[in-house]
Image: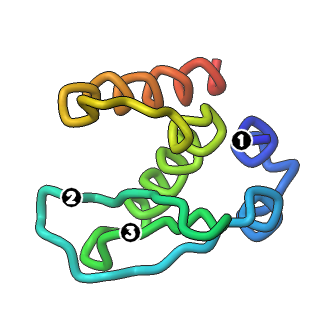
Amino acid sequence: MLKDLLNGFMTQKEILAYYNANVSYKELPKWINGFVFNYKGINNIIINKNLSYYKRKNTIIHELAHIELNQLNRVDRVFETSINKYEDEADRYIKFLLN
């Protein structure tokens, strides 16, 4: 599905509906571009409102990659040590889709 968004075959609104997701813009620390979490079956994407338009769009795509890779449903007792693994996996997935 994310590939369809990247190729222009699907709109952001359509992919958000498909993944039962919404996007909110909040004041976040400079070092946090965004994050995603699931609450009661809704995928909530939170984006730093201080980002540029381009960086916001890239961050939304990155967070959608986490959803598409089913990373929100992974149970990991030591999640803090796995954050970089999940972030890298999402970035690699986007690069793969763009090729």
Asked whether the beta carbons under mark 2 and mark 3 sit within 8 Å of each other, the answer is no
- Disc 1 residue type (three-letter): Leu
Disc 2/disc 1 C-alpha distance (Å):
22 Å
Q: Which residue is mark 2?
A: 32
Percent x, y for residue 74?
A: 50, 33
> Residue 76: x, y in percent?
37, 30
On screen, residue 84 above or below 30:
above
Q: Looking at the image, is 64 positioned above or below residue 24?
A: above
Q: Amino acid at mark 2?
A: Ile
- Could you give the CA–CA distance between mark 1 and mark 3, rounded to whole angstroms? 18 Å
Q: Residue at x 59, y 18 (%)?
A: 96
Quadrant of the rendering where the C terminus is positioned: top right
The secondary structure type at the circle numbered 3 is strand
Q: Nearer the viewer, residue 53 or 72?
A: 72
* Coordinates of residue 90 in the picture (x, y in percent): 47, 31
* Residue receiving disc 1: 2
Mark 1 or 3 closer to N-term? 1
Question: Where residue 47 is drawn, which disc sits there?
Answer: 3
In the image, what residue occupies the spot 30% across and 31% down? 77
Residue 85 location, quadrant: top left
Colour convention:
rainbow
Residue 1 location, x and y as percent? 80, 41
